[in-house]
Image (spheres, rainbow, N blue to C red):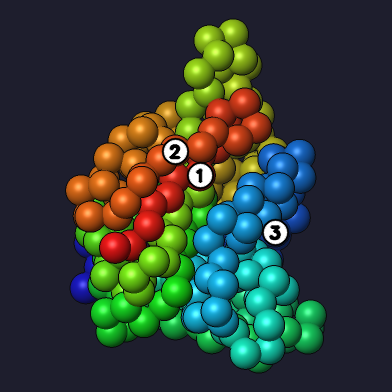
Amino acid sequence: MFDAKARYVRSLFSGVPIEYDILLGLLTFAQDRRWRAYVVQRARPPNNEPILDVATGTGLLAADFARSISLLGYVVGVDLTLSMLKTARSRLRSKQFGTKVDWVLARAENLPFRDESFGAASISLALRNVSDVQKTLAEMSRTTGSGGIVISLDFARPTNGLFRIFYYDYLLGLFPLFGRMVSEAWGRTLTYLGRSILKARTGDQIANLLSSEGLLDAKSVPLTAGIVCAVYGTKQ
C-alpha cells in the first residue's frame, strides 16, 4: 500500500535511474565514494552474514558491499522503484559480481524478511525519502541479528555558519540548475532533493531514534564538513 509520499518518491525516481550514478559523483565531487567506503568499513559483518541495503536505488552501496565480501557472503538490495532495481541488476551483472546480490521490490517500512535475517542493515542517502523514518529504522533493526550494525548515511546541514550559506545556495540554486541541464525529470528530482535536505533530521536526532529502537551506542559521525552524517548503532 503506497501513501502520497511513497507514490511521489517512486514517480520522481522512476524517470532518472540511467544518469543517477554519474550525477551523484559529479554533484558530490566524488565524495560519495568516500562516504560509502566508510559505511562498508563500519557495517560489514565479520562472518559472511548477509547484508541488507534498504532503498538501494541503483545499487551503488550494495555493489561496494559485494566487492568487500567473500564468495560466501551476499547482499540484498531493497527499493520501491522497479526501474532503479533493474538498473542496479544490469550494472552489477556487467561488473561480474551480480551473483552476490539479490534484489527485492519492497517498501522500507515493510521489509519482507524474517527477524534477524541479516548481519547488518544500511540505508544510504534515502532516509529523508521514506514516509515513516521510525518504522523504517524499526524494520532495519528487526531484520538485523544480534551484534549487527544498523547504519544510515544521509545528507545533513553543516554546522559551520559561513559554509552553510554557500552550501544552501548550492542546494537550492545550482542543484536544480544542473538537473535541468540533463532533463526535466532531473530538474524536478534535484529541486526536491535540495529542499528535502534542508528539512532533514539532524544526525543526533537520528541517533536518538536508533536508541529508541534499542540499538546500543548509537552515534552520529559527520563527514566532509558535516555535509553528510553516518549514524549507526549495534543490535543487542
The x, y position of residue 48, in whole percent, is 56, 82
Of the image marks 2 and 3, the number of the one nearer the N terminus: 3
Q: Nearer the viewer, residue 131 or 158?
A: 158
Q: Residue furthest top?
A: 162
Taking 76 as reference, is 207 left or right? Answer: left
* Above or below 94: residue 221: above
Q: Position of residue 125 (x, y in %)?
A: 51, 50
Name the N-terminal-most of marks 1 and 2: 2
| Residue at image mark 1 | 230
Q: Name the residue tied to disc 3.
A: 21
**Disc 1 and disc 2: Cα gap in Å?**
6 Å
Per the image, the residue denoted by label 2 is 220
Q: Which mark is residue 144?
A: none
Q: Seen in the image, is 213 located left or right of residue 16?
A: left
Q: Residue at x 63, y 82 (%)?
A: 89
Nearest the eye: 146 or 29: 146
**The N terminus - image quarter:** bottom left
Q: Residue at x 27, y 40 (%)?
A: 208
User: What amino acid type should be assigned to the residue bearing mark 1?
Assistant: Ala
Looking at the picture, tell me which residue is in the foreground, 234 or 200: 234
Which sits earlier in the primary sequence, circle 1 or circle 3? 3
Question: Which numbered disc, 1 or 3, marks the residue closer to the eye?
Answer: 1
Q: CA distance from mark 1 to mark 3?
A: 20 Å
Number of numbered discs present? 3
Q: Quadrant of the C terminus?
A: bottom left
Tag 2 and tag 3, C-beta contact below 8 Å: no
- What residue do we see at 63% from left, 58% from top? 41
Residue at left 75%, top 55%?
Answer: 22
Marks 2, 3: nearer the viewer: 2
User: Is residue 160 or residue 87 the one in the foreground?
Assistant: 160
Q: Are marks 1 and 2 in contact (CB under 8 Å)?
A: yes
For badge 3, the amino acid type reads: Asp
